[in-house]
Amino acid sequence: MRPLVAALATAALFTSIATGAQDKAPAPAPAPQGKEAYHPGLGEIMALQQMRHIKLWFAGHNGNWPLADYEIGELKEGFDDVTELLGGDIVEQHVGGPLADLQNAINGKSSAAFTAAFDGLSAGCNACHHTLDHPFIVIQRPMVLPYGNQVFTPQR
């Protein structure tokens, strides 16, 4: 009896496969034509720059020079993106010098030089905003730390 059941089951399986092969399945929907890659706008880039500006302040203010060095590198990358979007050398004109001063202060691990250079960067940002007809965007030293989940003091 077992061989008969096995034979019937096998026959049913092959019949099912053969029938399915005869029924044409609908063609799959065509893949979406090349979606345009996402390119953030100036507002999105500048929101990230503001976040980096805040983190840079708290890192340098706390003497966490490796984190400050990391954040200034991120700021530089962001300003490269802004330059690519705007064209010209407006970013370099306004923040190039202050970024170099900040990098020197971080490399020298000088809190006093860092504070002065940071204020210079903020002034450069505000001057750029004026030049671009956005004087209502005013950047200053952060007063509160919005990142309660990150340690800004140097780790030993």
Image (cartoon, helix red, strand yellow):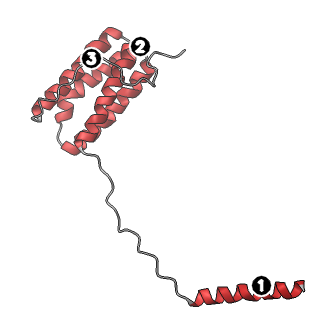
> Mark 1 and mark 2: span between their CA atoms?
76 Å
Q: Kindly identify the amino acid type of the residue bearing the numbered disc 3.
A: Ala
The disc label shown at residue 72, or none = none
Q: Kindly identify the amino acid type of the residue bearing the numbered disc 1.
A: Ala
Q: Earlier in the sequence, mark 1 or mark 2?
A: 1
| Residue 21 visible to the viewer | yes
Q: Residue at x 34, y 62 (%)?
A: 35
Q: Which residue is mark 3?
A: 117
Q: Are marks 1 and 2 in contact (CB under 8 Å)?
A: no
Q: Position of residue 28 (x, y in %)?
A: 46, 76
Q: Which residue is mark 1?
A: 9
Q: Which residue is mark 2?
A: 63
Q: Position of residue 82 (x, y in %)?
A: 24, 39
Q: Earlier in the sequence, mark 3 or mark 2?
A: 2
Q: Residue at x 88, y 86 (%)?
A: 3
Of 34 and 95, nearer the camera is 34
Above or below 114: residue 55 = below
Task: Determine the image quadrant of residue 70.
Answer: top left
Q: Quadrant of the N terminus?
A: bottom right
Q: Nearer the viewer, mark 1 or mark 2?
A: 1
For this orientation, the residue located farthest to the front is 1
Of 37 and 15, nearer the camera is 15
Q: Position of residue 100 (x, y in %)?
A: 29, 23
For this orientation, the residue located farthest to the right is 1
Q: Position of residue 127 (x, y in %)?
A: 14, 26
> Mark 3 and mark 2: span between their CA atoms?
14 Å
Above or below 101: residue 94 = below
Q: Quadrant of the C terminus?
A: top right
Q: Nearer the viewer, mark 3 or mark 1?
A: 1
Above or below 17: residue 89 = above
Task: Determine the image quadrant of residue 61.
Answer: top left
Q: Label 2, secondary structure: give it.
A: loop
